Image (tube, grey):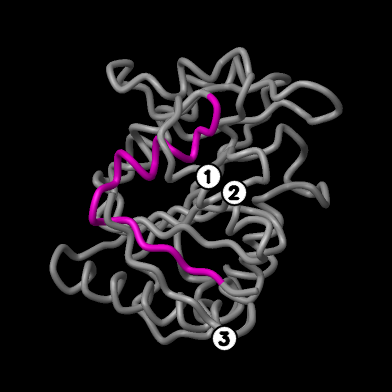
Amino acid sequence: MAVVEHRYPDPESLGHALAERLGRDLGAAVADRGRASLVVSGGTTPLPLFRALAGLELPWNRVTVTLADERWVAPTDPASNERLVRETLLEGRAAAARFVGLKTRDRTPETAVAACEAALAEISRPFDAVVLGMGSDGHTASLFPGAPELAQGLDPASGRRCVAVHPGGELPPRMSLTLPALVDSRSLHLHFTGDAKLEVYRRALEDGPVEEMPIRGVLRGAGRRLELWWSP
């Protein structure tokens, strides 16, 4: 499990460095294949990354952006990943990119799976770049330990691109890309900050079931395509 590790002194320099790397990859993809695809995650960690990416001079009209997961809330809700991406990444030059969201008008994510599958099917695979975060419990995207739908999300034989997820507790239901979809990328980037998350990452590198820490599925399935981007 060889992971290239990039470490930076602060989140801003980390975000700028990852943005430059993604910019090179997306630009090369457009030059080689006429289009590029980028999968991003929500939360506060990617804010410096998104702002730096938005300022890059790229052929954004040839780039498709989608999400690793989405909370089943309105796109105007403060908790919406779509809202975050539209307000911080799809600005300036990057406003020309095509965005494929995961939230539909369906009341539940279960009834939206077919529509999301169809939308995701229009994005060429493998993706050109996938940027993932990681929770303190070892979840990534919305593949949560203990979620009833976790086995579906991890199943390499399912052929599914997305899965409806109920994390439990106070957390809203979600739509998540499956593990096979997430690792079907030319490059994968695990992006997080802080010593506590670094310790979670180290535990995930140890032997143990993927169901206990779903990020292990990415670490084991991505091979040399996975790179770690971290700062305190």
* Residue that mark 1 sits on: 203
Position above or below: 36 against 77: below
Query: What's drawn in magenta, residue-wise?
Result: 212-230
**Gap between marks 1 and 3 measured at Cα:** 26 Å
Residue 5 lies in the magenta-colored region: no
Mark 3 highlights which residue? 13
Q: Looking at this view, is 186 or 33 the one in front? A: 186
**Disc 1 residue crowd, few under 14, some 14–19, many 20+, Cα 10 Å:** some
User: Measured along the vertical axis of the image, is residue 147 above or below residue 124?
Assistant: above
Q: Residues under labels 2 and 3: Cα distance?
A: 22 Å
Q: Does the magenta stretch include residue 224?
A: yes
**Horizontal and vertical percent for residue 111?**
60, 15
The residue depicted at 49 percent of the width and 47 percent of the height is 100
At label 1, the amino acid type is: Arg
| Label 2 packing within 10 angstroms: few (<14), some (14-19), many (20+) | some
Tell me which amino acid carries mark 2.
Val
Q: Residue 200 carries which label?
A: 2
Q: Identify the secondary structure beneath mark 1.
A: helix
Res 58 quadrant in image = bottom left
Towards the viewer: 12 or 10: 10
Q: Which percent across, then down, holds residue 125?
A: 25, 44
Q: Which of 45 and 122 is in front in this view?
A: 45
